[in-house]
Image (spheres, coloured by chain):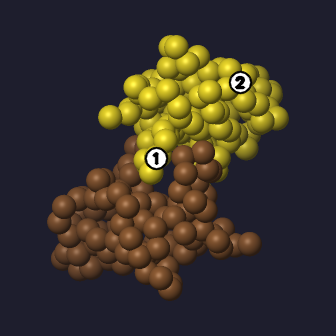
Chain colours: A yellow, B brown
Amino acid sequence: AQTVTQSQPEMSVQEAETVTLSCTYDTSESDYYLFWYKQPPSRQMILVIRQEAYKQQNATENRFSVNFQKAAKSFSLKISDSQLGDAAMYFCAYRSGGNTPLVFGKGTRLSVIA
Amino acid sequence: NAGVMQNPRHLVRRRGQEARLRCSPMKGHSHVYWYRQLPEEGLKFMVYLQKENIIDESGMPKERFSAEFPKEGPSILRIQQVVRGDSAAYFCASSPRGIYEEKLFFGSGTQLSVL
């Protein structure tokens, strides 16, 4: 079974600084997708960024980028120029082919210090 | 185009009562997924449904829990004879075709509290 591990229960960053959230996963599949979701206090799950496993180029969405290391099964999220609105729980997730469900890590709570 | 709508947002039940959680997927989406989130935990998959069919219920507890997604109307997650351990946030997500490349759109969840 696929598993997703986020080893940092909590992280903090100063406003305008950069922070990296870690995620590793375990799979025997070669084709899959990886996701980072943000969950603010409102509880809404918001997709931050998505990476296709077959693409070597790291995905980027404005201030959010990933470092995807397929051989190491690592998928970290980098947030640049952190803003107060970035404070939230961040979940790493994995999904492989077929009708398989999205598998989530336990999350990292990010605090942004003004 | 309204997003995924879940209601109620908060639901309080006493032990032994039934809880019914509703999810209306985004327009045009025929695939629905239910997840449960315990405090300080990630989302755990429960069940995946397509219109009138259960595709994968590997995450559903064997007893007291059931789900449906009828041809007309919302998807329903039903919990019979609730116990305190059922207290959690229940999220619904939908997608157009159910393929793994697709982005899942999530609702805001229903917070179930069992007294």
**Where's the C terminus of chain B, which quadrant?**
bottom left
Placement of the N terminus of chain B among the 4 image quadrants: bottom right
Query: In this image, A38 relative to B110: left or right?
Result: right
The one nearer the camera, A24 or A53, is A53
Q: Residue under label 1, please give it.
A: A98
Residue, disc 2:
A58
Q: Residue at x 49, y 26 (%)?
A: A30
Q: Position of residue B54 (x, y in %)?
A: 36, 66
Residue A25, horizontal then vertical, whole percent:
45, 26
Asked whether residue A60 appears in the rendered view, the answer is yes
- Of callouts 1 and 2, which one flags the residue occurring earlier in the amino acid sequence? 2
Going by the numbered disc 1, the residue's amino acid type is: Gly
Say which chain tag 1 marks.
Answer: A
**Residue sitting at x 31%, y 59%:** B57
Q: Check whether the beta carbons of the residues at disc 1 and disc 2 lie within 8 A of each other.
A: no
Query: Which residue appears at 43% of the width and 81% of the height?
Result: B70
B9 sits to left or right of A18 = left
Three-letter code for the amino acid on which mark 2 is drawn: Asn
Q: Label 2 neighbourhood size at 10 Å, few (<14), some (14-19), many (20+)?
A: some
